[in-house]
Image (cartoon, rainbow, N blue to C red):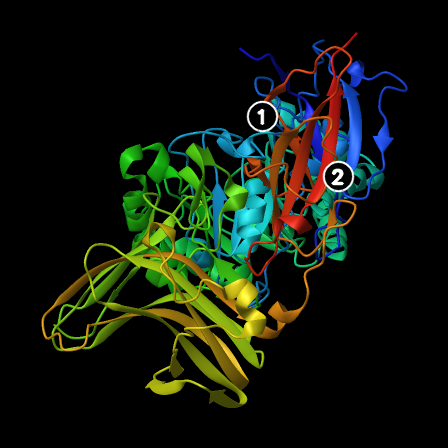
Amino acid sequence: MEASTVLTRATVRRLRQGPAAPEAMAQKEPDRLPRRQRRPGRRIKEDQEAAAVFREVVSFTPDPLPVRYYDKDTTEPISFYFSSLEELLAWTPHMEDGFNVALEPLGCRQPPLSSRRPRTLLCHDMMGGYLEDRFIQGSAVQNPYSFYHWQYIDIFVYFSHHTVTIPPVGWTNAAHRHGVCVLGTFITEWNDGARLCEAFLAGEERSYQAVADRLVQIAQFFHFDGWLINIENPLSLAAVRNTPLFLRYLTTQLHRQVPGSLVLWYDSVLQSGSLKWQDELNEHNRVFFDSCDGFFTNYNWREEHLERMLGQAGERLADVYVGVDVFARGNVVGGRFDTDKSLELIRKHGFSAALFAPGWVYECLEKADFFQNQDKFWSLLQRFLPTHSICSLPFVTSFCLGMGTRRVCYGQEQAVGPWYHPSAQETQPLFGEHKLPGDGGGWVKMHCCLADAWHGGSSLLLQGVIPPEVGNVAVRLFSLQVPAPPRIFLSLVYKLEGPSDVGVALELTTGDAGGCHIGSISVLNAETGSRQSLQPLQVPPTKLARWAGRCGQLLSGGWIQRCYEVSLRGCLLQDLFVNFSRPPGSGKEESFTCRLGEIQVVDADSLLAPLHQVQDVTVSQVRYFRVHCWERTRSDSPSREPPGPEKPTFLGLAFANQYRVVDLVVEAAGPGQDGCVEFLVEPVPREGFLVPQAEWGRAALLYSSPR
């Protein structure tokens, strides 16, 4: 049996992205072993053209890590919170904080959050928070909670009962990818909360300004979008007089530092300082509403509360978020699978809605039926939830939920076993069911499915029926509001289950953005503009072949890729459909089951630009990174070429600007010899194609046994 060494504390680091930078920058530095294992002069950096090389002496001496940043059992990096005012005020950014910085910027969306349309807020409160979602680099949990109806919500609040709840970065990345802003929670409760409030609110303005400044700094540093302020304890007269000033200062400073940010106040304390939930906005709590961006009501309201609030809110109806406890605790309207009753009344009066703990479908119902129950819950609310549209390119999704029973990379199995990584969730469609008008019986239903995947851990399952009297059925997957570039490149990866000759194609709806002209495709009439029936490219243009070389081919696992190129001028991309058509000559009812593995909509000209080769392990213009490694002998010099025909070992995905390698088994270094392990950083461009291995970043770690 060969001896092996376990390297447990290596951290791949890269240059941190600045708060306002639109693209991620990354640079790998020496792998980090425990601090007490380092000795002056033991680390040597060897400059070589192809890869940076770092040297370490292996030590087996235990070394505690900061418990705030690392899980005590696995030493994996974790998201964290603050339990006291002292912890909040003492915080300054450290290297470990970089794990929790969101790489995904807040996506462009239409209408913008600032529009006066009533909004939908989701307040995620689940079993105290910081469960498996705290593992920044993912975990191997089975049957985790997943939220994927993002197109129906506008604001996501991560809630816990810790004093300062910083949203786990996986939620921020997933929400931002869907154009949804993310808020943390600042909460005080009970006697301890009253003492905390007295400490920073009852004194001079510099005290509450120091707390506000730190909350702004935290949101700016970790790249989330604001705070829900929840004071659930009585306040002294001195403290309550300063509370509107604290809110106003926090809101002003946050707007300056974090564009599009929000500060919301929860209905609890009155302007007298008493703790008394009102279940409405009224003259006793309006001073707090006037000092921030919005008001989140308590849950025990009736329609008369809503009617009274019309006069209090004035033109700010959309800034009043009427609370709905999905668990239906207390004397509430609706809740559980009757939550639509709450929404109907809220929308009737023009208010925004705040859905508290919709994870009820996961916590209280059978885990085995989670996806069916989640889809049922949101389908009942769908008519009261206006959607928002994607408004920028490239648009690429594999429909991955950020979880699975195995991990697949473009049809090739990469790892087997359960995994959960919220940052890896791709853009999700408009889930629901489409029925043809009339009594013909044609329909299409869509569901997420973990049984098969083209890329990631899941795919989109579409099932339907084409009745005899019609030629096709189509279902809208995504709402777009994108000014079209002159040429767009589209790709669809799909597979039909079982023997079927049903045709599968993408369709686009376009609007007129000033004399819309479409070339190279046929135009059909549609109610919302022009529906474009796209003709697939059998052979992609030569200049696009690098990205579309699989077009028209049968791929591994039975997947098929269809590619399209469309010329447009003065058009607005509005909706993306998938169309199912009956086989030629068929006059019977056609049933079908189809999986969608990937959709790409890309400015074709952007694909002609050369890739930036990774130099000095610095990369840019990426969505995230895949991290790999392979072992080398000391005689191998690190280079752009692989050490042999074998593939590198996949280690994980990095959605932060650094990655921690844990429990990596490597061959033991002999006496007087060096072992060598090389780490490879694969950038993943926003256009969604594979970058050749020669252009990955890399660095080698030489290690030796202690003398």
Name the image quarter holding residue 407: top left
Q: Is residue 688 above or below residue 172?
A: below
Pointer 2 and pointer 1: residues touching (CB < 8 Å)? no
Of all residues shown, which one is farthest toward the bottom? 515
Image disc number at residue 704: none
Distance from disc 2 to disc 1, alpha carbons, whole Å, reads: 46 Å
In the image, is residue 479 above or below residue 381? below
Q: Residues within 10 Å of mark 1 (few under 14, many from 20)?
A: few
Give the amino acid at mark 1: Trp
Asked whether residue 187 appears in the rendered view, the answer is: no
Q: Is residue 679 visible?
A: yes
**Residue 200 percent location from the top left of the image:** 76, 33
Residue 520 horizontal side relative to residue 582, left or right: right
Write down the residue under mark 2. 28
Q: Secondary structure at mark 2?
A: loop
In the foreground, 79 or 44: 44
Q: Quadrant of the C terminus?
A: top right
Judged left or right of residue 565, residue 80 is right
Residue that extends furthest to the right in the rendered view of this protein: 41
**Image side of residue 422 versus residue 59, left or right:** left
Identify the residue at horizontal 55%, vertical 39% (top origin). 645
Dot 2 alpha-carbon crowd within 10 angstroms: few under 14, some 14 to 19, many 20 or more: many
Q: Amino acid at mark 2?
A: Lys
> Which x, y percent locates residue 318?
52, 62
In this picture, residue 83 sits left or right of residue 403: right
Tally of marks: 2
- Expressed as whole percent of the image width and height from the top left, the position of residue 298 reads 47, 44
| Secondary structure of the residue carrying numbered label 1 | helix
Q: Where does label 1 land, which residue? A: 190
Q: Nearer the viewer, mark 2 or mark 1?
A: 2
